[in-house]
Image (cartoon, rainbow, N blue to C red):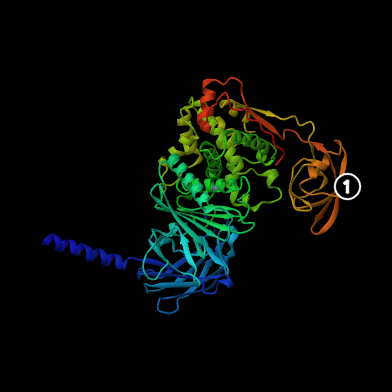
C-alpha cells in the first residue's frame, strides 16, 4: 500500500512538473493559398516568470543546400501576445530575430505570415493547388527551448491533406503531429494538397510513395524499384534507421532537384517520358542518391552540422564526402545490384575522366576548399564556375571512387570505401559532434593499413590531377585517351536551345574565351547560317584548324558577331578496357567492387565520350 501511495505521489509529482515545464506548440494555416501566405502561430506555455524577454528566430538556411537564404525576409504581419490577446511589445534585433518583452507572463504567442512562393528551391511554396513547407523557412524557434518536444497542428485548405515524415497524433483535430525537438520538426518537410499517397511496407518498416501532380509512370513498377533500393541500402548499412519513410515527389513539367531529410526526401520530377526505353533511369538514380543520404549526411554528419547552427553558415570541408560520397555510392550500388550492367558502369568511368580533365576549375580549386566555400560559390553558379571552381558532386564522387580503389589495393582487397563509410557511421553517431576530414582520413588509413597522407594532400587539400590511370589499374582496367587529332573545337560548352545553342561555359584559355564569347550568349548562326546545339559540332567539321568562323549571338537581346578560331581539343575522350591477364588481386578487386565475374565471355568494356 505504501508502495502504491509513493508511486502515485511520484506520478502526480511528475505530472505537475510536466504541466509546469515549458512547452512549444506550432499551428500552420493557409486560409487564402492563392496569396502565397502561410499563417503561423507559435505558442510557448509555462515559461519561467523570471525571464523578462524571449527571442524568436528563423533559420537563415535549410538542410541539404549550403547557402544562406535569409528566410526571415518572407515574414510579414508579426505580432505577439500573452495567449489571451493582450499584446506584448517586440522589436527586431537582427535580420532573423524578434525580441518579445514578455515580462512576468508565462505564456507567449507569436503570430506571423510567411510569403511562400519558391517550390523549386524546396524551401516553402503555397498556391491554389498545394503547399510545401521545409520547416526551417517557416517555423521560428527560441534557442534555449530548441531541444524541447514540440507539437504541430496543420489546418489544410479545403479538402487538402498533409503528407510528412512527422509522427501523427491520431484524434481530433486531424493533422496534429509531434517531434522530439525543433531540429527534427524542421527536418520533416510537409506536402499539403491533394497529392496521391500509397503506403507500402519493406523490411517491416512503413513507407509512403506520395506524388503531387500527374505522372505517366506505372505505380507498381515504381514501388518495385523503390523497394529494391530500400533493400539494397538495408543490406549495405545493416539497418533502416527510421520507423516510417516518405518519398515526396512533385511531378511538374520541367521540375527537377531533390533534397534529403531525416525520414523523407523531396524530389522534383518531370511527369512525362517514363514509357520510353530507359525512361526510369533518371528516377532510379535520383531515389538511390536521396535514400543513401538517410545515412550519409542525415546521420553521419560533418562536425559543423552536428548540431546545426541555424544562425549562419555551417562551414564544412567535408561536403565532398557528404555529396560526392553519396553520388559515388548511389551509382556503384546500382551497378552491383543489377540496375546497371558492369559494362555500362565502366563506360561511365570513361565519361567521368573526360569530364574531370576538361574542367579547368578542378586545377584551380581543391575539393576541400570547394566544400568550405560552397556557401558563397557553389550554388551561385556564376559564369566563372567551370573555370575556377571544382564540384563537390562530380569531383567528390570521382575522388571517392579513387579512394575506394586505393583502399582495396593497399589492403589486398580486404577493405573498401564501403567499410570506410560504415565504420564512420558506427564511430560517429548522430548527436556525438560529427566528424572531420582528419577523422575520415584516419579511418581510411586504418582500413588501408598504411598512410594516405600523400593521397589526401595531393587530391583533397591540393589540386593535383586525379591519378585515374593508376587507380583503375588496381581493378585491372586500362585507361587510354582516344586519338583527338581530329576533334574541332571552339572552347565552349553549349546546351541546345531549340533553334539556337546556348553557351553554358567558355573554357579558360580557349579561342572562344580570348575572342570575347560569354556564358549566356545564344548562338543563332555560324557564318551566316542558322545553327543549333545539336548540329554545331557537325558544322565545325567543314572547317580546318586555324580557320576563323563567325558566330552570331544574341546577348542582352542585341545581336552581335564574334570571330572564333577553330582549334584542336586535347584529351577530351577516353576508353576504359580490361587488361589481358589480370593478377589475382586485380581480378578480385574488380569482381568485388562491381559484384560481377571477370569472366572469359565478358566483352571488353569500351567507351568514348565527347566533351560534356
Ligand atoms: Zn545529395
Examine the rendered structure and indicate whether residue 190 appears above or below residue 454: below
Return the residue nearer the eye: 568 or 582. 582
Residue that badge 1 annotates: 527
Q: Choose between 469 and 274: the one closer to the eye.
A: 274
Dot 1 falls on a residue whose secondary structure is: loop
Is residue 190 toward the left or the right of residue 365 in the image?
left
Foreground residue among 464 and 123: 123
Specify whether 417 is left or right of 572. left
Identify the residue at image location x=71%, y=34%. 573
Q: Is residue 60 above or below residue 384?
A: below
Residue 321 visible to the viewer: yes
Q: Position of residue 570 (x, y in %)?
A: 75, 33
User: Does residue 144 appear to the left or right of 196 in the view shown?
Assistant: left
Query: Can you say which quadrant of the picture contains the N terminus?
Result: bottom left
Q: Position of residue 323 (x, y in %)?
A: 55, 45
Quadrant of the image for the C terminus?
top right
Residue 97 lies, in percent from the top left, at 51, 65
In this rendering, position of residue 73 left or right of residue 305: right
Q: Dot 1, crowdedness within 10 Å: few (<14), some or many (≥20)?
A: few
Amino acid at each position: 500500500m505504501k508502495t502504491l501511495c509513493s508511486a502515485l505521489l511520484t506520478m502526480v509529482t511528475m505530472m505537475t512538473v510536466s504541466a509546469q515545464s515549458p512547452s512549444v506548440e506550432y499551428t500552420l494555416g493557409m486560409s487564402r493559398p492563392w496569396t502565397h501566405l502561410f499563417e503561423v502561430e507559435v505558442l510557448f506555455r509555462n515559461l519561467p516568470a523570471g525571464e523578462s524577454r524571449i527571442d524568436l528566430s528563423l533559420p537563415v538556411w535549410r538542410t541539404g543546400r549550403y547557402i544562406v537564404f535569409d528566410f526571415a525576409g518572407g515574414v510579414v504581419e508579426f505580432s505577439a501576445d500573452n495567449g489571451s490577446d493582450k499584446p506584448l511589445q517586440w522589436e527586431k534585433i537582427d535580420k532573423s530575430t524578434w525580441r518579445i518583452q514578455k515580462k512576468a507572463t508565462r505564456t507567449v504567442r507569436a503570430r506571423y505570415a510567411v510569403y511562400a512562393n519558391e517550390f523549386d528551391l524546396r524551401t516553402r511554396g503555397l498556391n491554389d493547388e498545394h503547399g510545401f513547407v521545409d520547416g526551417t523557412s517557416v517555423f521560428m524557434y527560441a534557442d534555449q527551448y530548441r531541444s524541447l518536444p514540440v507539437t504541430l497542428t496543420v489546418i489544410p485548405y479545403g479538402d487538402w491533406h498533409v503528407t510528412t515524415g512527422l509522427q501523427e497524433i491520431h484524434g481530433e483535430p486531424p493533422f496534429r503531429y509531434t517531434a522530439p525537438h525543433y531540429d527534427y520538426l524542421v527536418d520533416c518537410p510537409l506536402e499539403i494538397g491533394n497529392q496521391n499517397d500509397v503506403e507500402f511496407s519493406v523490411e517491416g518498416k512503413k513507407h509512403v510513395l506520395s506524388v503531387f501532380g500527374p505522372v505517366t509512370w506505372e505505380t507498381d513498377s515504381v514501388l518495385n524499384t523503390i523497394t529494391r533500393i530500400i533493400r539494397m541500402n538495408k543490406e549495405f548499412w545493416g539497418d533502416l534507421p527510421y520507423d516510417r519513410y516518405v518519398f515526396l515527389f512533385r511531378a511538374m513539367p520541367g521540375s527537377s532537384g531533390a533534397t534529403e531529410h531525416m525520414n523523407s526526401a523531396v524530389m522534383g520530377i518531370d511527369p512525362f517520358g517514363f514509357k520510353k526505353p530507359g525512361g526510369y533511369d533518371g528516377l532510379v538514380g535520383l531515389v538511390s542518391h536521396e535514400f543513401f543520404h538517410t545515412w550519409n549526411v542525415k546521420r553521419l554528419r560533418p562536425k559543423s552540422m552536428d548540431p546545426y547552427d541555424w544562425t549562419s553558415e555551417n562551414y564544412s570541408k567535408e561536403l565532398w564526402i557528404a555529396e560526392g560520397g553519396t553520388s559515388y555510392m548511389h551509382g556503384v550500388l546500382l551497378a552491383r545490384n543489377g540496375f546497371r550492367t558492369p559494362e555500362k558502369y565502366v563506360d561511365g568511368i570513361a565519361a567521368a575522366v573526360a569530364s574531370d580533365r576538361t574542367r579547368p576549375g578542378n586545377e584551380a580549386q581543391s575539393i576541400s576548399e570547394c566544400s568550405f566555400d560552397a556557401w558563397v560559390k557553389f550554388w551561385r553558379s556564376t559564369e566563372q564556375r567551370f573555370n575556377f571552381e571544382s564540384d563537390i558532386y562530380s569531383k567528390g564522387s570521382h575522388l571517392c571512387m579513387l579512394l575506394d580503389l586505393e583502399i582495396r589495393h593497399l589492403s589486398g582487397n580486404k577493405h573498401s570505401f564501403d567499410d570506410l563509410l560504415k565504420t564512420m557511421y558506427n564511430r560517429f553517431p548522430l548527436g556525438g559532434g560529427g566528424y572531420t576530414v582528419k577523422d575520415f582520413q584516419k579511418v581510411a588509413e586504418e582500413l588501408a593499413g598504411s598512410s594516405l597522407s600523400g593521397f589526401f594532400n595531393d587530391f583533397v587539400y591540393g589540386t593535383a590531377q586525379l591519378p585515374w590511370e593508376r587507380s583503375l589499374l588496381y581493378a585491372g582496367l586500362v585507361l587510354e585517351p582516344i586519338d583527338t587529332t581530329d576533334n574541332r573545337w571552339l572552347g565552349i560548352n553549349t546546351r541546345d536551345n531549340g533553334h539556337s545553342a546556348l553557351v553554358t561555359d567558355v573554357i579558360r584559355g580557349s579561342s572562344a574565351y580570348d575572342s570575347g564569347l560569354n556564358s549566356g550568349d545564344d548562338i543563332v548562326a555560324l557564318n551566316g547560317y542558322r545553327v543549333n546545339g545539336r548540329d554545331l559540332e557537325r558544322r565545325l567539321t567543314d572547317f580546318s584548324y586555324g580557320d576563323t568562323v563567325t558566330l552570331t549571338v544574341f546577348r542582352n537581346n542585341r545581336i552581335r558577331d564574334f570571330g572564333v578560331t577553330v582549334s584542336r581539343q586535347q584529351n577530351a575522350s577516353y576508353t576504359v578496357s580490361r587488361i589481358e591477364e589480370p593478377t589475382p588481386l586485380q581480378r578480385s578487386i574488380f569482381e568485388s567492387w562491381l559484384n560481377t565475374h571477370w569472366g572469359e565471355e565478358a566483352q571488353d568494356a569500351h567507351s568514348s565520350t565527347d566533351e560534356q
